[in-house]
Image (tube, grey):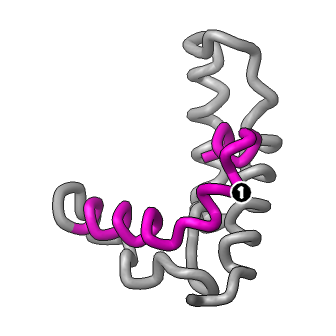
């Protein structure tokens, strides 16, 4: 998601409400997670960033994986900030 947020395609992706709906539908059918709220995957209630209670675990895991990255990474905090910004942009959209 952070890579998409930094790409020149982000505006096109944000404009495609149908794409967000299709992804949520697909995940709910084939990769459903009991904790996921696919019904809330719409502007105003969309969540990309895990709850605060999970962030320290996520940052530790990210640090352990750094050697696997082909290019240098900006770090978990920076990546989370980018995704938080994207989440905010999605949630500020008007529902069509």
Whether residue 51 is situated above or below residue 78 in the rendered picture:
below
Q: Residue at x 62, y 67 (%)?
A: 15
Kindly indicate the quadrant of the structure image that contains residue 45.
bottom right
| Front one among 70 and 63 | 70
Q: Secondary structure at mark 1?
A: helix
| Residue 72 located within the stretch drawn in magenta | no
Q: Give residue 90's position: percent from left, percent from top.
A: 67, 72
| Front one among 58 and 38 | 38
| Residue 11 located within the stretch drawn in magenta | yes
Disc tally is 1
The magenta region covers: 1-28
Q: Give residue 41's position: percent from left, percent from top.
A: 47, 76
Which image quarter is the C terminus in?
Answer: bottom right
Q: Residue furthest left?
A: 30
The local crowd at label 1, few if under 14, some if 14 to 19, many if 20 or more residues have their Cα within 10 Å, is: few
Whether residue 40 is situated above or below residue 68 in the rendered picture:
below
Q: Residue at x 79, y 43 (%)?
A: 77
| Front one among 50 and 28 | 28
Task: Answer with left or right where residue 42 lies relative to residue 11.
Answer: left
| Front one among 71 and 59 | 71
> Which residue in the protein does label 1 denote?
11
Q: Residue at x 59, y 46 (%)?
A: 57
Task: Answer with left or right where residue 45 lies relative to residue 75.
Answer: left
């Amino acid at each position: 998601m952070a890579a998409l947020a930094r790409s020149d395609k982000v505006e096109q992706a944000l404009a495609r409400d149908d794409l967000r709906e299709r992804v949520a539908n697909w995940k709910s059918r084939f990769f459903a997670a009991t904790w996921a709220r696919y019904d809330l995957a719409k502007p105003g209630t969309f969540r990309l960033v895990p709850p605060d209670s999970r962030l320290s675990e996520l940052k530790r895991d990210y640090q352990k994986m750094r050697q696997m990255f082909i290019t240098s990474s900006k770090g978990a905090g920076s990546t989370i900030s980018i995704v938080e910004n994207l989440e905010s942009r999605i949630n500020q959209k008007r529902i069509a």
